[in-house]
Image: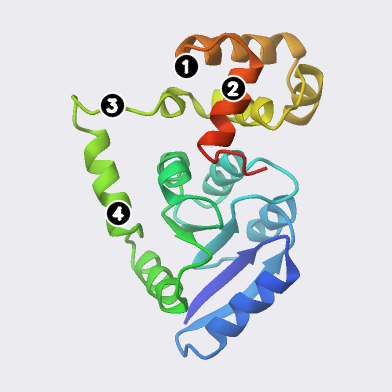
Amino acid sequence: MIKVFIADDHAIVREGLKQILSDIPDIKVFQEAANGDDALKMIRNDNYDILLLDIAMRGKNILELIKLAKQQHANLPILILSMYPEDQYAIRMLRAGADGYLCKESAPERLVEAIRKLSQGGKYISSALTEKLIAEIQPKQNIAHHNLLTDREFQVFCAIGAGQGVTEIAKKMSLSPKTVSTYRARILKKMHMHNNAEIIRYAVDNQLLYS
């Protein structure tokens, strides 16, 4: 029996996932949480075979959540469920420690396939993403500017893209405003930009606003 933990802040989504998996004899949903902070507390006290994480929940940023979950249970497979573009987010999630990425609009059969594959120690990505990963390791391929950012820089980038100011970002990320300003300067340099307006335009054009 594959024990599944679902973390999603939408009750209707959790119920839908449980309904999909209720007819699968070798998979059972044993626990659920409405946010990442609660999920971290719960997995600390029990053992699960798969952790399903929504990409955008209240609480910790998804990249931090993945890393903290892996610190607690290094061998716990994590499958990211998202309504956001695979080509924009999946690679960064995998680099952070996730073991698979699945769009919520995918067929139920793909969810079952992904869970089973991860439970056997494998990774789950689409064939399209596999091609993108291969392209990214080719030295002559052009890499999107936002993929040059570190995870922290990417978090700050997304926050600026969402229209948040330095003070607000600093509070949410538990950083000093000076540190956030330093990250902003690095972002502008790496992405060859000059101001927040260019960051916002880039984030909107590339569908990078997930929180």
Mark 2 or 4, closer to the camera: 2
Q: For the residue labelled by badge 1, is the local secondary structure a helix, a strand or a loop? A: loop
The answer to whether marks 2 and 1 mark residues whose Cβ atoms lie closer than 8 Å is yes
The quadrant where residue 195 appears: top right
Q: Which residue is mark 2?
A: 199
Mark 2 vs mark 1: which is more N-terminal?
Answer: 1
The answer to whether marks 3 and 4 mark residues whose Cβ atoms lie closer than 8 Å is no
Mark 3 vs mark 1: which is more N-terminal?
Answer: 3
Q: Is residue 39 above or below residue 92?
A: below
Identity of the residue drawn at 74% across and 61% down: 34
Q: How would you rate the neighbour count of disc 2 (Cα within 10 Å): few for under 14, some for 14-19, many for 20 or more?
A: many
Quick check: can you spot residue 77? no
- Residue 64 in the image: state x and y as whole percent: 60, 39
Q: Which residue is mark 3?
A: 142
Identity of the residue drawn at 49% across and 25% down: 150
Query: Which amino acid, by three-letter code, is at mark 4?
Result: Ala
Query: Which amino acid, by three-letter code, is at mark 3?
Result: Asn
Mark 3 vs mark 4: which is more N-terminal?
Answer: 4
Badge number at residue 191: 1
The quadrant where residue 160 appears: top right
Query: Which amino acid, by three-letter code, is at mark 1?
Result: Met
Identity of the residue drawn at 56% across and 87% down: 22
Judged left or right of residue 146, residue 124 is left
